[in-house]
Image (cartoon, rainbow, N blue to C red):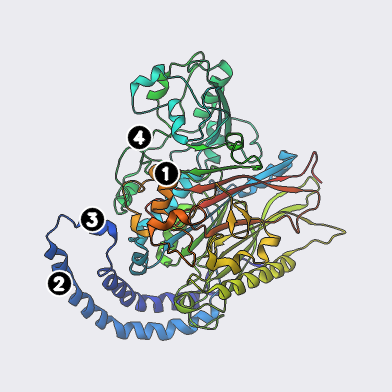
Amino acid sequence: MVLYTSPFPNSFLSVLHSFSWGLIFPCYWLADRLVASFVPTTYEKRQRADDPCYFHALCIIITTPIYLALLVASLPFALIGFLLWSPLQSARRPYIYSRLEDKNQANGATLLTEWKAAGTGKSFCFGSANVCLLPDSLARFNNVFNTQARAKEIGRRIRNGASRPQIKIYIDSPTNTSISAASFSSLVSPQGGDCANRTVNAGIKRTTSMDYKGDNSGSNNGEDNREDKGGAGEPNEGEENTCIVRINGEDNGHMSDTETDAVNGQAHATGPAEPSLESDAEISKTPNHKQKEGDSRSLDSYSASRESLVKVRVGDGTVDQSTVNNKLLYKASIMKKTSVRKKKHTDETFDHEISAFFPANLDFLCLQEVFDKRAAEKLKEQLHHYFEYIVYDVGVYSCHGCCSFKFVNSGLLFASRYPVMDAAYHCYPNGRGTDALASKGALFLKVQVGSTPQDQRIVGYISCTHLQAIAGDTTVRCEQLDMLQDWLSEFRKSTSSSSTANPEELVAFDVICGDLNFDNCSSEDKLEQQHSLFTHYKDPCRIGPGEDKPWAIGTLLDPEGLYDEEVCSPDNLQKVLESEEGRKAYLVYPTSKNHSSSQKGRKASLKGNGRRIDYMLYTEEGLYLEWKVEVEEFSFITQLAGLTDHLPVAMRLMVSTGEDDP
């Protein structure tokens, strides 16, 4: 299957399309600004609180006639452009495949060799997020704004979080069994000098992923930096930049020589980069750029919250705690190990956490609601600093390919560190209401993740989708889930080059990511909860229909509280969501026949920990028979606090092959 690197089959159609859109764009932009001026966000309302009440009204009175006059003047040109643009969509391809052109930063081919070195298997990390990159006037109805600046900042935060070194620190102490991330601040606190005499009281084993302060110069993946600065050595499977340090509660802050060498070696691997002026200027346009305690500024802040662990460069011998505190280079997001939660969830087999950052070494990313084309370009540019392969501008326009006229694309975007072999898109033909104006559908991808010593390709399948959003459209969503399964089955058959007798390809995983727009606790979503999709695919957060695991939380934030000081930074939002009271205040909760999710006083009687509508599913069906797939880690991520009304989710899968590769 040929991957489409341009939206049209020839340059003539591309030029004609650009010309037609150039005629439409002034009218589109003016209409967008006109509507946006009448839909203020809560952040803007607070900013204007000190202004005289007549000031904003005066601005609208002055600007509205200007916008209207220019809008009317641009309409004839927009009409001509539309008459050219609409028929061109019949020749438009369903997506654009972009590959990083800088060979110095490209490393997808290198990643394919890791499987052979791994021997017993490899882990893969998947992320999914609804980023609400609508035209600015429409985004404001979700209480977010400045779509272009948000797109750039979202991309920057994702690649900064994913490109950080992954370091696991185990802390052993017999005195404390707390699972709170705040309790970990006793190890290293950047706020005060009195920490020199503090001892480590961190309960039982806990792992910590060190968070890299993003390289604003745009290095890709950090692999090149590690190769240049870290010296020789083959990267290990799935954890090529992982360091493990063990600290005991009884040694009063001193590290052994082995631990010191481990930290020292990793600290020299990469160094912090100075924030660029361009990035700071762009951040200032977004509402959550204020510097406060606990605000990580997308890993670029030089201050650290009390939950953050600081990675330091140390020499041989013992380490004085005050010296450790003064060398602030990295931040850390606390991961709760399975052993920490065994008292409450003895049957759980994997780690789960609320993390302030995207997982280190994120391999695949599925995004929804990337509707604005200019924002998609900005987002792609940022993501290409980490992901080599990106599929974007997915969907159809006009009347081509779907039953009704489509004004915007599907909003789906896929990014990968591994080469994309095949891709296919299908549009849901049964969209209703406002959802019918977008070409919502499903994007199916086949990626190569390695090869065996016998040169058999090892591949994986990833599906990204966004279902009908309107409440009450249960039947529509169930029909879309049926189509999703059928299309995925067809895609696997059409792209498979293997036979049972002579397998040329070995399937390592099959994952579905996306915003399904229903949760597993609402009484109104019972039909979707019992869909056959969940008999073939496993949901790590789900016990059964209508019941989530106790640690699972909602992914839909209450739009009215997005800019509250308590949740406007990744660290602050993480703290809030770790408490039941915080979740009740800032998450949208499942609805029932007798309760309304808008009545916060009644949330206590509702099931679950918020509406979890963003899913990551995996299956063990259709994979290589001798391999086993298990969840290693599941995360709810707060790094996009203030930039979207959804919580991103991430899942790390371990594909185990046994002692030897087949």
Q: What residue type is labelled 4?
A: Ser
Q: What residue type is labelled 3?
A: Arg
Quick one: 418 or 325, which is closer to the camera?
A: 325
Q: Where is residue 510 in the image (x, y as percent from the top left)?
A: 68, 57
Q: Where is residue 428 in the image (x, y as percent from the top left)?
A: 57, 75
Q: Who's the residue at 46% across and 44% down the image?
A: 160
As measured in the structure, the alpha-carbon distance from the residue carrying label 1 to the one carrying label 4 is: 21 Å
Relative to residue 230, is residue 381 depicted above or below? below
Sequence order check, earlier mark of 1 and 2: 2
79 lies left or right of 591: left
Tell me, for residue 62, which label it has, or none: 2
As measured in the structure, the alpha-carbon distance from the residue carrying label 4 to the one carrying label 2 is: 43 Å
Of the residues tagged 1 and 2, which is closer to the observer?
A: 2
Tell me, for residue 46, which label it has, or none: 3
Quick one: 286 or 57, which is closer to the camera?
A: 57
Q: What residue type is labelled 2?
A: Ile
As measured in the structure, the alpha-carbon distance from the residue carrying label 4 to the one carrying label 3 is: 26 Å
As measured in the structure, the alpha-carbon distance from the residue carrying label 3 to the one carrying label 1 is: 35 Å
Which residue is labeled 4 in the image? 303
Q: Who's the residue at 42% across and 52% down the image?
A: 584
Of the residues tagged 4 and 3, which is closer to the observer?
A: 3
Q: What residue type is labelled 1?
A: Ser
Most extreme residue toward the top is 317
Sequence order check, earlier mark of 1 and 4: 1
Sequence order check, earlier mark of 2 and 3: 3
Q: Is mark 4 on a helix, strand or loop?
A: loop
Q: Are marks 4 and 2 in contact (CB under 8 Å)?
A: no
Q: Is mark 3 on a helix, strand or loop?
A: helix
Q: Do the residues labelled 4 and 3 touch (CB within 8 Å)?
A: no
